[in-house]
C-alpha cells in the first residue's frame, strides 16, 4: 500500500486513446440528452402539454414525472454500460 | 400473536441477522475497512448502494411527502434517481480506476494540493453529519412508536447495533449487512403497498394500481383523487403548486447532489473493475427504482385513504364528516406520539380536514359551517401508519417497523464510515501522521467510527434546528462543492489547483449563505422563506444547482488565468480515462 499516485507500465497518451475518449464523450452526450429530455423535458417543462394525453388513468406528463423518467434512467444506464464494454474492446483498452 | 410481541420478534431477528453477518465479514486490513478489499460483486454492491442510499427519509417520509405534494413530489422521485445516471456516466467508472480509498483523496491527488483535500474533507464532514443526524432521528421515531421505549433508549439500541458492525467490520461488514438490510426494507415497503393497491383497485402492482380504475370500475383513481382534493380546497393532485423554474432547479440540485454525496460515491470504489462500476450503478438504480416507483403509488393511495376515512359522505353535508367518537383505533395510537392532532374548532363532534389556507375556498367552507382545518397528520407517519389505516394483519405492521429501522441503520452506517475514513485517512494519515502503520491506521479508523457513532447519537438525541433542513443542506452543498470538483478533475485536463479550490469555496459559501439567509442556522433567518424573496424564484432546496453553475464559472475563469497542472497530474487524468490497468491499481 502506497500513497503515491502510480500507474506503472501504462503507455502515455496515444491517438487510439484520444479516439476512444472522443467516442466515449459522444456516447455520454447522447445518453445525457435522453436523460435530460425525459426528466426536465417531459416531466417538467412540457408537463402541461403532455398532461392533455393519457396513458391508462395517468395524465402523460404526470406519469413521466413520477414513473416514466425513472424507467428511462435505468434503460439509459443499461445502454451506456453495454455500449462502453463494446467500446473498451473495440479500442483495446478493456481490463483483461 | 399480540402485535407488540410480534414486533419485538421481527426486529430482534433482523438485528441478530445483521450482527452475525458483521462477525462473519470482519475487516482485517485498511483496504477491507475503507473499500471492502475491492472485491464486492457488482450486483451485491448495487444492493448495498441502494440500502446505503435509501435512508429513513426515503422509507418513512418520502411517500408521505408525495401524498401532500402531489405532482410536485416528482422533484424527489426524479432528483434522487436521476443522479445515478450522472454517477454512472460521469463519475463512478473513473473514480474506480483512480483506485484509492476516499473522495477527498481523489481531490487532493488530482489537484496536487493538501488544501484542496482539506476543503473536500470539510465539505464531506458537514454533509455527512447533517445527514446522519436525520437518520438517528428516524431510528428514534421508529423505536418510540413500535417498541414503545422512549426515544433515548431507542437511540442507544440503534447506536449499539451500528457501532458493532461499522466499527468491527468497516466497509466489508457494512456492505454485506446492507445487502441484508436492503432485502428487509424492500420487502417491508412493497408488501403493504401490494395489499393496499389490491384493496383499493383490485390491481396488485402498485405502479399500475394508481393509474387504474377504482374497485367499482367507475372512475380512474387519480381522477377521483383530483376531484376529492379540489372539493376540499387543495390543489389537484396531478397538478403542482410550485413554479416550473423551482421544480427544475430543485430536481437539478437533488440529482447533482446525489451524484456528489461521498457515501454514495465511495460505494463504487469497492467493486473489482471499472466495467463493474458501471454495471453496479445500473443495479443500484434498479434496486432503488423498486422503492421509488412504489412510493408515488403509496402516496396517492394513502392520501385517498386518509381523506375517505375522514370525509365519509358528500363534502358540505353536515353528516358528511367522520364523527370523532367513531374514530378508528390507529387515530389514538398515533395521537399518543403527538404526530396526529385533532381540535374540534366548530364543536360539531365531527372531523373536518380541508385546506384552510386557500382564501378562495374560505367562503365555501364557512357556508358549510366549518371553522378551520381540524386534523393535522404529520407526513412522516403515513408510511408507518398506512398498514394500520388499511387494517392490514399484524405481521405486516411488524415488518414495516423492521424495514424502517433497516433503512435508517444502513444509511447511518455508510455515512459513519465515510466520516471515519475522512478522519483516519485524509486527516490523520495524510496531514498529521504520515508514517502511521497500517495497523495503526485501522485502529484509528475504528476509533474515529466509534467517536462518530457517539456524536451522531448525540445529534439524534438533541437535534440542532437544521435537521429538518437536511435535504436542502446536504444535497445543496454536495451539488455546489464536491460534484463540480470531481467532474472537472476527470473531464478537464486543464483544470488546476487554483481553479478547483476557488470554485469549491465559491459554491460552498454561496450555497451556505443562501441557505442560512432563508433557513437560519445559529442566526435568525434574514428574510422570510417565501417565493417573493427568492433569487429568480428558486427556493433554498434548489439553490445548490445555482451554486454548481457558479462553481464551474469561477473554476474555469481562475484556471484560465493561472498555470496548467503539472505533467504527472495530466498523465494521471489520461490514465483514469482508460479502463485498462484497473486491476494493477487494485494490487497496490
Image (cartoon, helix red, strand yellow):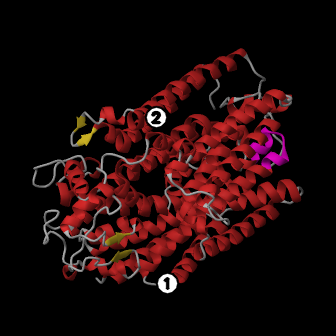
- Image position of B323 with respect to B169: above or below: below
Q: Secondary structure at mark 2?
A: helix
Q: Position of residue B140 (x, y in %)?
A: 51, 75
Side (left or right) of B165 relative to B279? right
Of B403 and B57, the residue lying toward us? B57
Residue B251 vs B445, above or below: the answer is: above
Dividing the image into 4 quarters, which one contains the N terminus of chain B?
A: bottom left
State which chain disc 1 sits on: B
- Marker disc for residue B150: 1
Label 2 resides on the chain identified as: A
Q: Is residue B517 magenta?
A: no
Pinpoint residue B4: horizontal percent, then vertical percent.
36, 83
Marker disc for residue A78:
2
Say how many tags the image has: 2
Give the farthest residue toward the top.
A15
Image x and y of residue A42, in percent = 38, 33
- Is any part of residue B495 visible from this angle? no
Mark 1: few/some/many CA within 10 Å (<14, 14-19, 20+):
few
* Neighbours of disc 2 within 10 Å: few (<14), some (14-19), many (20+): some
For the residues labelled 2 and 1, the Cα–Cα distance comes to 46 Å
The residue segment tinted magenta is B105-117
Q: Position of residue B113 (x, y in %)?
A: 84, 43
Image-quadrant location for residue B273: top right
Respond whether the residues carrying marks 2 and 1 are from the same subunit. no
Q: Is residue B538 visible?
A: yes
Q: Main secondary structure of the magenta part?
A: helix
Is the residue under label 1 in contact with that under label 2 (CB below 8 Å)?
no
At 67% from the left edge and 40% from the top edge, which residue is drawn?
A: B95
Amino acid at each position: 500500500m502506497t500513497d503515491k499516485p502510480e500507474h506503472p507500465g501504462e503507455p502515455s497518451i496515444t491517438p487510439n486513446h484520444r479516439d476512444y475518449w472522443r467516442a466515449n464523450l459522444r456516447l455520454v452526450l447522447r445518453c445525457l440528452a435522453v436523460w435530460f429530455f425525459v426528466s426536465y423535458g417531459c416531466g417538467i417543462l412540457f408537463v402541461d402539454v403532455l398532461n392533455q394525453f393519457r396513458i391508462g388513468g395517468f395524465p402523460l406528463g404526470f406519469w413521466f414525472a413520477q414513473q416514466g423518467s425513472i424507467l428511462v434512467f435505468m434503460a439509459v444506464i443499461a445502454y451506456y454500460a453495454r455500449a462502453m464494454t463494446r467500446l473498451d474492446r473495440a479500442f483495446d483498452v478493456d481490463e483483461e | 400473536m399480540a402485535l407488540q410481541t410480534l414486533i419485538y420478534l421481527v426486529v430482534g431477528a433482523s438485528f441478530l441477522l445483521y450482527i452475525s453477518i458483521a462477525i462473519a465479514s470482519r475487516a482485517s486490513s485498511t483496504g477491507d475497512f475503507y473499500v471492502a478489499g475491492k472485491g464486492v460483486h457488482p450486483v451485491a454492491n448495487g444492493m448495498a448502494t441502494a440500502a446505503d442510499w435509501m435512508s429513513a427519509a426515503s422509507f418513512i417520509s418520502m411517500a408521505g411527502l408525495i401524498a401532500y405534494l402531489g405532482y410536485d413530489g416528482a422533484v424527489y422521485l426524479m432528483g434522487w434517481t436521476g443522479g445515478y445516471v450522472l454517477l454512472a456516466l460521469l463519475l463512478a467508472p473513473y473514480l474506480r480506476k483512480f483506485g484509492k480509498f476516499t473522495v477527498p483523496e481523489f481531490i487532493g491527488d488530482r489537484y496536487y494540493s493538501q488544501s484542496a483535500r482539506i476543503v473536500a474533507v470539510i465539505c464531506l464532514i458537514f454533509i455527512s453529519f447533517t445527514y446522519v443526524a436525520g437518520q438517528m432521528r428516524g431510528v428514534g421515531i421508529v423505536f418510540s412508536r413500535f417498541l414503545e421505549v422512549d426515544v433515548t433508549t431507542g437511540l442507544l439500541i440503534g447506536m449499539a447495533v451500528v457501532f458493532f458492525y461499522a466499527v468491527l467490520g468497516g466497509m466489508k461488514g457494512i456492505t454485506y449487512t446492507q445487502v441484508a438490510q436492503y432485502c428487509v426494507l424492500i420487502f417491508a415497503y412493497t408488501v403493504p403497498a401490494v395489499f393496499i393497491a389490491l384493496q383499493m383497485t383490485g390491481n396488485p402492482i402498485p405502479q399500475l394500481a394508481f393509474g387504474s380504475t377504482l374497485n367499482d370500475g367507475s372512475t380512474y383513481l387519480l381522477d377521483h383523487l383530483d376531484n376529492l382534493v379540489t372539493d376540499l380546497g387543495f390543489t389537484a393532485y396531478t397538478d403542482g403548486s410550485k413554479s416550473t423554474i423551482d421544480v427544475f432547479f430543485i430536481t437539478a440540485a437533488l440529482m447533482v447532489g446525489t451524484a456528489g454525496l461521498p457515501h454514495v460515491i465511495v460505494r463504487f470504489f469497492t467493486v473489482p473493475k471499472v466495467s463493474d462500476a458501471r454495471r453496479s450503478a445500473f443495479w443500484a438504480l434498479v434496486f432503488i427504482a423498486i422503492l421509488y416507483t412504489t412510493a408515488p403509488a403509496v402516496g396517492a393511495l394513502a392520501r385517498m385513504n386518509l381523506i375517505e376515512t375522514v370525509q365519509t359522505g358528500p363534502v358540505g353535508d353536515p353528516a358528511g364528516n367522520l364523527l370523532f367518537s367513531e374514530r378508528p383505533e390507529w387515530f389514538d395510537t398515533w395521537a399518543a406520539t403527538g404526530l396526529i392532532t385533532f381540535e374540534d374548532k366548530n364543536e360539531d363532534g365531527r372531523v373536518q380536514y380541508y385546506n384552510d389556507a386557500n382564501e378562495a375556498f374560505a367562503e365555501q367552507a364557512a357556508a358549510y359551517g366549518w371553522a378551520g382545518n381540524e386534523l393535522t397528520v404529520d407526513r412522516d407517519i403515513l408510511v408507518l401508519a398506512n398498514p394500520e389505516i388499511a387494517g392490514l394483519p399484524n405481521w405486516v405492521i411488524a415488518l414495516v417497523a423492521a424495514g424502517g429501522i433497516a433503512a435508517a441503520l444502513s444509511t447511518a452506517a455508510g455515512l459513519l464510515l465515510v466520516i471515519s475514513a475522512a478522519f483516519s485517512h485524509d486527516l490523520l494519515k495524510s496531514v498529521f501522521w504520515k508514517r502511521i502503520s497500517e495497523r495503526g491506521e485501522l485502529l484509528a479508523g475504528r476509533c474515529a467510527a466509534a467517536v462518530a457513532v457517539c456524536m451522531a447519537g448525540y445529534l439524534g438525541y438533541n437535534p440542532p434546528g437544521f435537521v429538518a433542513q437536511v435535504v436542502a443542506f446536504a444535497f445543496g452543498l454536495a451539488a455546489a462543492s464536491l460534484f463540480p470538483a470531481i467532474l472537472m478533475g476527470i473531464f478537464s485536463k486543464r483544470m488546476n489547483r487554483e481553479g478547483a479550490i476557488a470554485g469549491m469555496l465559491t459554491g460552498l459559501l454561496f450555497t451556505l449563505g443562501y441557505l442560512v439567509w432563508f433557513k437560519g442556522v445559529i442566526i435568525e433567518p434574514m428574510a422570510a422563506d417565501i417565493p417573493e424573496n427568492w433569487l429568480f424564484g428558486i427556493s433554498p432546496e434548489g439553490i445548490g444547482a445555482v451554486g454548481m453553475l457558479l462553481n464551474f464559472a469561477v473554476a474555469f475563469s481562475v484556471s484560465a488565468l493561472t498555470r496548467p497542472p503539472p505533467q504527472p497530474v495530466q498523465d494521471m487524468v489520461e490514465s483514469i480515462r482508460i479502463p485498462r490497468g484497473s486491476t494493477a491499481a487494485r494490487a497496490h
